[in-house]
Amino acid sequence: MIIQKSIIRKGIKKQVLHFLQIRAGALSFLLLFAFSIAGATPPVAGPAAEPIELVPGKLPFNPKEFYIANVIDEREDPSAVVWLVPNGYKAGQAVAHQKIDLKGGGQAAIQAFIQKSLPSNSKLRPVSIRLKKCKITETPGEKGGVNGQIKLVMDFEYERKGESVHLTSYSGGARYTRAPGKITLIEPALRQSLTSALTYFNNWIEREADTNIKLAKGVKVFITDFTDNSENDTVFHSPDRPLVWDDFQGQPRGGKYAAAVFTSFSYEGGSEVKDGYVHLNLQMKVYIIKSSSWVRSSSRDAYSLNHEQRHFDIVKGVVERFKQKLKSESFEPDDFDRVIATLYIDAYREMNRLQDQYDRETQHGLATAVQEQWNRKIDDDLLKR
């Protein structure tokens, strides 16, 4: 879309076109805005050496997801913002650009502009801006005019618990045309560019806040137990489904033991971001493998089956403690996988340690009095869950 504004002064008609081109991600659109320039006004005499004062003002949005905590200057040349075509330039001459900075310095002026233009609510997410480029370069235009180009590049980072998390980048700018000496056009053009960058980021974070894991406020853990016993070779622990000797389908092995049960546990799950939180959905599986569990035909009695059932129950108790640790853990949205894996390994080691202790103290079920002590201990442990 192109808007053309005609200015007629004292019979002289002059057309002035001002362009603002903004690029953000895959978006590209063209805004055209006009500034009143008196066509008959002569150029201002002498060089324009005064720093440009960036004027704050109310922006077209009120941030609900963030506040700008800091502006970090990473420009290649922070000595100035404007490379100006000086007054008195004559067509055909080589341009000796005049460098002009913002009042107070580029970084300080932009940070002050943002702080004075945007509400700062420290209860929201602190965001830092890395200022990669903010440069205005002018070139001689037609009929003695001056063309200006603004280039603005920013990285936006979430300052989360001492860590900077990159969120998105903005690359945009503006173009303007001014008459010689009319440098007052520069400040509103730069202000519009900064406003466009901040508006882009506000739109981005409002769109992403509820579903982007980088912006998640925390982790909520939801745990269920898998008890579906429809699989042929697996029995999952359930109070309604105790072990039976038909579950021991493996071939007996040599040695002095009457039976063996292969029992273990695992977890499955996934995560999604909902309403600004990572919802971590885990499913626990405590199981035995039938084909790896066996019993000698001479040992199929209730006492021996109870001993094997207690091996199964010990694993269930370990998993219940594992679940409690998961629920009480303060997970970070970007690190919960590693913490869960560590807790799982700890629980697996506990399972192996308790299984060995159980068989050692009960003498694999031969010490009936100790077996009864373990029965009560395991029952009490499960009842607490």
Image (cartoon, rainbow, N blue to C red):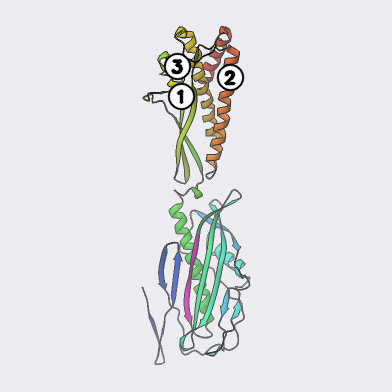
Q: Amino acid at mark 2?
A: Asp
Label 2 neighbour load within 10 Å: few <14, some 14-19, many 20+: few
Q: Amino acid at mark 1?
A: Tyr
Residue 47 location (% of width, % of height): 60, 85
Per the image, the residue denoted by label 2 is 356
Q: Amino acid at mark 3?
A: Gln
- Counting residues from the N terminus, which is met first, the one under dot 1 or under dot 3? 3
Q: Image check: 330 left or right of 18?
A: right
Q: Marks 2 and 3, Cα distance to the nearest angstrom?
A: 22 Å
Pick the front one: 362 or 35: 362
Mark 1: secondary structure:
strand
Per the image, the residue denoted by label 1 is 287
**Measuring 47% from the left and 80% from the top, which residue is drawn there?**
177
Residue 297 location (% of width, % of height): 44, 9
Mark 2: secondary structure:
helix
Segment tinted magenta in the rendering: 169-177
Label 3 neighbour load within 10 Å: few <14, some 14-19, many 20+: few
Per the image, the residue denoted by label 3 is 251
Asked whether the beta carbons under mark 2 and mark 3 sit within 8 Å of each other, the answer is no
Pick the front one: 247 or 26: 247
> From what the image shows, is residue 97 above or below residue 111?
below
**Measuring 49% from the left and 27% from the top, which residue is drawn there?**
265
- Counting residues from the N terminus, which is met first, the one under dot 2 or under dot 3? 3
**Measuring 41% from the left and 71% from the top, which residue is drawn there?**
31
